[in-house]
Image: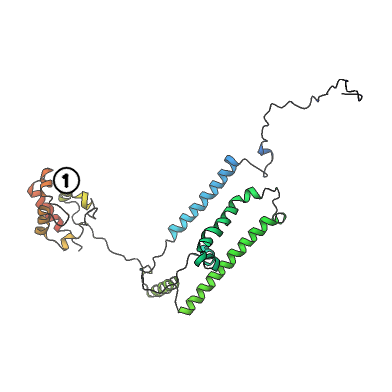
Amino acid sequence: MAHGKDSKEKVVFVGDSRVKKANGYIVPPDYTAYPGKSEAFIPNFLLKEWMVGVVVLVGFLVLTIAEPAPLGYPANPSASIIPMPDWYFLFLYEYLKLPYASGDYVALGVIGVTGVAFTALLLAPFLDTGKERRFYRRPIASSLMLLSLAAIVYLTNTAWTHYVHELEATNQVPEHIQREEEAQEKRAQGLPTSNAIVTEEVAIVDKDDVAMETFKLAGCISCHAVDLKGASGPSLRGIGDTHDEAAILGIIKEGQGTMPPMYDNAIATGLTDQDVTELATWLAKQKAE
């Protein structure tokens, strides 16, 4: 402590014993002391966001299982249709139809404008560094957000309006409306409303026959699968409708198409000529009815 203006007077600093000496590292505050105001990003906040994401994902999975995607009509290149994207891409669809984003300016519209927009979005956290969080106190960020929302709403509405006018001009009915009308008619007649082709599966005849084991030992399962539905080779279910026992035995001994003769391979595995004949007899029984 100094008492005058003499430069040679010794200056003594009086410390306060209540102030603790720092060790060079400031311990961050415990956020539990401020309930509801702040928390550590890792792992508290991140874990909450992850749990919310899991719940949303499970909800989407439940919806996709409960309501599968409908089958559309078979592709018809000669059909006159108006291609349209999903609703959440309508604003981009309409934007790419604008004069400065299509034709001679398609590179500017696809790469230039969208590149600037996404770059600005990425740089937003670095450009807008103010501590104010109320939107009316952040005029630039709030104006850009409202402008973007207004553009999306306008372009989406314009795209859909043009689509409706094109349908009226060409006297077309959208596919989803056709499917709905057909489903209502089928429902009224008591018919199935799905466009999927339902085929009855051909069952294996005499599944417990000893020839089934011969079929496996002979190596037939490598091409025709254990369930006879076919793997790299054709299905053998219902083969008795097109081939009799003699024809099947001839194919085993002489081969057919890309299938080589399998008789010698079957004998090499320890099977007898009688086993091969019984196998042909069993395969001839595989009929649809």
Q: Which element carries disc 1, helix, strand or loop?
A: helix
Q: Position of residue 69 (x, y in %)?
A: 42, 62
Name which residue lies at 52% across and 73% down.
162
Q: Position of residue 154 (x, y in %)?
A: 59, 67
Residue lying farthest to the right in this orientation: 4
Residue with the mark numbered 1: 217
Name the quadrant of the C terminus: bottom left
The residue closer to the viewer here, 276 or 268, is: 268
Name which residue lies at 65% across and 50% down.
127
In the visual, does 40 lie left or right of 56?
Answer: right
Q: Amino acid at mark 1?
A: Leu
255 lies above or below 25 = below
Q: How is the image coloured?
A: rainbow
Q: Position of residue 173 (x, y in %)?
A: 44, 76
In the visual, does 9 lie left or right of 176?
Answer: right
Q: Residues within 10 Å of mark 1 (few under 14, many from 20)?
A: some
